[in-house]
Image (cartoon, helix red, strand yellow):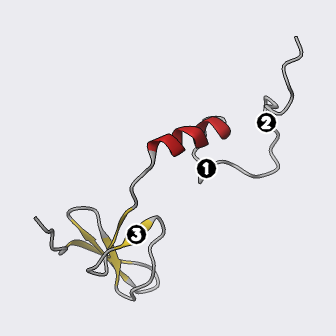
Amino acid sequence: MNHKHTAETSRTLPDGVVLSICSCGARKMSTGSEIAGGQLDADGWYVAKKVDENRRAYDLLQNEGYEPETRDHDDIADGVNSNIPNID
């Protein structure tokens, strides 16, 4: 069964561009511009990329539980320095 995307909701963004959202979650901009985190399908809509759960689990371990996209990279010091080896 093929799903035909139709705009269930539409939002006008501050710059006048219309963002259309399908009932399945696919998104499309009126300007045809790329939508971050999406993969372009044959109908010109951006659908969510499939998540590799093994890779995500590895990334969470490497980033102390933070999602790689949301980790704070500012100059705020960590309470725990994970780079110091345990020297008991």
Tag 3 residue: 39
Residue 54's place in the image compared with 86, above or below, is below
* 44 to the left or right of 52: left
Kind of residue at badge 1: Pro
Alpha carbons under labels 3 and 2: distance apart = 35 Å
Q: Give the crowd class for mark 3: few <14, some 14-19, many >=20 residues within 10 Å.
A: some
The quadrant the N terminus occupies is bottom left
Alpha carbons under labels 2 and 1: distance apart = 16 Å
Q: Nearer the viewer, residue 40 or 16?
A: 40
Tag 2 residue: 78
* Residue drawn 66% across the image and 39% down it: 62
Q: Nearer the viewer, residue 16 or 32?
A: 32
* 64 to the left or right of 30: right
Q: From the image, state whether disc 2 or disc 1 is nearer to you.
A: 1
Residue 58's place in the image compared with 42, above or below, is above
Tag 1 residue: 68
Alpha carbons under labels 3 and 1: distance apart = 19 Å
* Residue drawn 79% across the image and 28% down it: 80
- Of mark 3 and mark 2, the one earlier in the sequence is 3
* Residue drawn 39% across the image and 55% down it: 50
Residue 62's place in the image compared with 69, above or below, is above
- Of mark 3 and mark 1, the one earlier in the sequence is 3
At mark 3, the secondary structure is: strand
